[in-house]
Image (cartoon, helix red, strand yellow):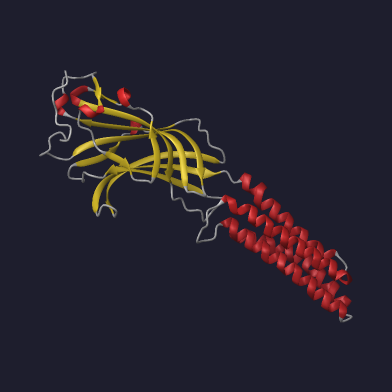
């Protein structure tokens, strides 16, 4: 029988801090939302601590509310749902009063991941767990490697999950104006860039190269050259609008943004070339216009390679 215990009083309240082992299991990752800065997944939280008052009850199971348990929470903004409720929300008593509690959660967690290197980025998604009520003099969290795991098969497209690491430290929590013992699980992920290469970089390169047809059109047809350049520019602008749905409104440039800006500059310069050659033709300087076009035929591909190369390296 479970003795009557004060569920609001930790083991040895006048003694050293109660050590709570924390395990974080990633059962599945369903979605990583760059626009809303959220990660959707399926997780298992495991807590273990020693309560000498429960010695001799090895193998017993009790409702979590009937024993003392650490009040910990996920510090990330989240909308998680507990999968085990009512009778299934239990603790298991082990040798020497060791208590183990497991809870499964599903839903979304805020990630706040930086996107400067999009779409060639590597991300570290942090899950921060701690107590809102108890300071480090009462509660110390420590990683539990045997209950920390990453499933071999994850239902996530466009990303390669590379690892899961855990750590614990005493940190200042500005929202509480106090220090807390914080357990952090870090999910390492690498974006699979090939999708964006074929969906963004390659089509954008074709649009830029389409504007280079200006250099092969006779300079006497400068109206057609300008029309071709304007078409390339409008196509590129429409492409930028279609790409804007991939990212939130950021206060900084990503790699994709810098690629687009350089492509836009090159298309604008190609239009400027058409205007210059048109002016030369009307001034009866066709030889100079042809020479200018021939120089641009190798100069613009070189500028594209140098500009995009400097962005990617």
The residue most toward the left is 14
Q: Answer left or right for 65 relative to 151.
A: left
Residue 258: give x, y in percent of width and height: 60, 60
- In front of the other: 255 or 302: 255
Can you say which quadrant of the picture contains the N terminus?
A: top left
Residue 149: give x, y in percent of width and height: 40, 32
Q: Answer left or right for 250 relative to 239.
A: left
Q: Answer left or right for 187 relative to 71.
A: right
Q: Which of the 4 image quadrants contains residue 74? A: top left
- In front of the other: 241 or 102: 241
The residue most toward the front is 86
State the residue at coordinates (30%, 22%). Answer: 87
Residue 154: give x, y in percent of width and height: 50, 33
Q: Which of the 4 image quadrants contains residue 144? A: top left
Residue 35: give x, y in percent of width and height: 52, 50
168 vs 294: above or below: above
- In front of the other: 240 or 306: 240
In this rendering, the count of numbered labels is 0
The residue most toward the bottom is 283
State the residue at coordinates (42%, 39%). Answer: 164
171 vs 163: above or below: below
Please indicate, yes or no, whether residue 313 appears anywhere in the rendered image.
no
State the residue at coordinates (53%, 36%). Answer: 156
312 vs 164: above or below: below
Can you say which quadrant of the picture contains the C terminus?
A: bottom right
Please indicate, yes or no, whether residue 236 appears anywhere in the rendered image.
yes
Q: Answer left or right for 230 relative to 129.
A: right
């Amino acid at each position: 029988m479970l003795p009557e215990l004060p569920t609001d009083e930790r083991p040895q309240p006048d003694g050293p801090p109660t050590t709570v082992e924390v395990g974080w299991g990633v059962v599945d990752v369903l979605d990583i939302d760059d626009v809303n800065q959220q990660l959707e997944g399926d997780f298992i939280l495991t807590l273990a601590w020693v309560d000498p008052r429960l010695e001799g009850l090895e193998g017993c199971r009790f409702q979590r509310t009937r024993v003392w348990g650490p009040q910990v929470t996920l510090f990330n903004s989240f909308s998680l749902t507990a999968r085990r409720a009512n009778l299934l929300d239990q603790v298991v008593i082990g040798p020497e009063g060791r208590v183990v509690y497991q809870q499964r959660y599903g839903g979304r967690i805020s990630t706040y991941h930086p996107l400067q290197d999009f779409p060639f980025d590597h991300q570290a998604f942090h899950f921060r767990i701690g107590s809102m009520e108890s300071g480090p003099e009462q509660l110390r969290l420590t990683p539990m490697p045997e209950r920390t795991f990453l499933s071999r098969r994850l239902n996530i497209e466009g990303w390669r999950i590379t690892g899961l690491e855990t750590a614990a430290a005493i940190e200042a929590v500005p929202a509480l104006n106090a220090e807390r013992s914080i357990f952090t699980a870090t999910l390492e992920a690498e974006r699979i860039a090939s999708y964006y290469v074929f969906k963004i970089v390659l089509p954008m390169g074709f649009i830029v190269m389409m504007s280079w047809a200006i250099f092969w059109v006779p300079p006497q047809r400068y109206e057609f050259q300008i029309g071709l350049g304007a078409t390339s520019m409008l196509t590129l602008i429409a492409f930028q609008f279609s790409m804007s749905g991939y990212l939130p409104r950021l206060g900084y440039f990503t790699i994709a943004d810098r690629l687009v800006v350089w492509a836009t500059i090159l298309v604008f310069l190609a239009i400027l070339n058409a205007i210059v050659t048109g002016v030369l033709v009307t001034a009866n300087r066709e030889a100079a216009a042809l020479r200018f076009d021939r120089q641009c035929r190798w100069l613009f591909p070189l500028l594209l390679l140098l500009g995009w190369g400097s962005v990617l390296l």
